[in-house]
Amino acid sequence: TGVQTCALPISQVIDDTQAVTVASASTNEKDAKGKGYNVEAASSVGKKIAERAKAAGVTQVMFDRGGYIYHGRIKALADAAREGGLEF
């Protein structure tokens, strides 16, 4: 799931059957590379979520753009997650 807030991109991998968050990433983390609310930041979140999801054994996800148009930051996050090995 890719989510945008007013200040930063956030992404979570959620197991709906067990109602638990498997992995998450955002630019609000101390070690985040892209800070802020831009395409570079969204791309770094996409790479990080793919890395964490794969470490948790998840490779296939459903991408929920939360009603946002698929372009700009949303597209950058999704493209980076795909490049990182997630399938959706």
Image: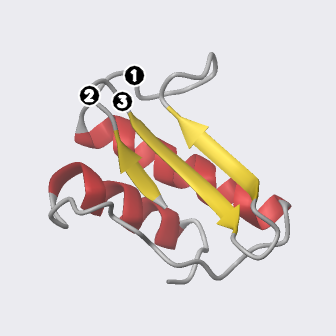
Front-most of residues 40 and 77: 77
For the residues carrying marks 2 and 3, which lies nearer the camera in this image? 2
**Relative to residue 76, is residue 55 drawn left or right?**
right
Q: In the rendered structure, which disc, 1 or 2, sits on the residue that comes first in sequence? A: 2
Q: CA distance from mark 1 to mark 2?
A: 13 Å
Which residue is at a point 17% across and 53% down the rendered structure image?
Answer: 72
Identify which amino acid the numbered label 3 is placed on: Leu
Numbered badge on residue 6? 2
Q: In the rendered structure, which disc, 3 or 1, sits on the residue that comes first in sequence? A: 3
Q: CA distance from mark 3 to mark 1?
A: 8 Å
**Relative to residue 67, is residue 23 drawn left or right?**
right
* Tag 1 residue: 35
**Relative to residue 68, is residue 32 drawn left or right?**
right
**In this view, 7 is above or below 52:** above
Identify which amino acid the numbered label 1 is placed on: Lys
* Tag 3 residue: 8
For the residues carrying marks 3 and 1, which lies nearer the camera in this image? 3
**In this view, 19 is above or below 31:** below
Which residue is at a point 47% across and 41% down the rendered structure image?
Answer: 10
Q: CA distance from mark 2 to mark 3?
A: 6 Å
Within 10 Å of the Cα at label 2, are there few (<14), some (14-19), or many (20+) other Cα atoms?
Answer: few
Q: Secondary structure at mark 1?
A: loop
Which residue is at a point 50% across and 27% down the rendered structure image?
Answer: 33
Within 10 Å of the Cα at label 3, are there few (<14), some (14-19), or many (20+) other Cα atoms?
Answer: some
Within 10 Å of the Cα at label 1, are there few (<14), some (14-19), or many (20+) other Cα atoms?
Answer: many
Q: Position of residue 3 (x, y in %)?
A: 39, 49
Q: Position of residue 6 (x, y in %)?
A: 26, 28
Q: Secondary structure at mark 3?
A: loop
Identify which amino acid the numbered label 2 is placed on: Cys
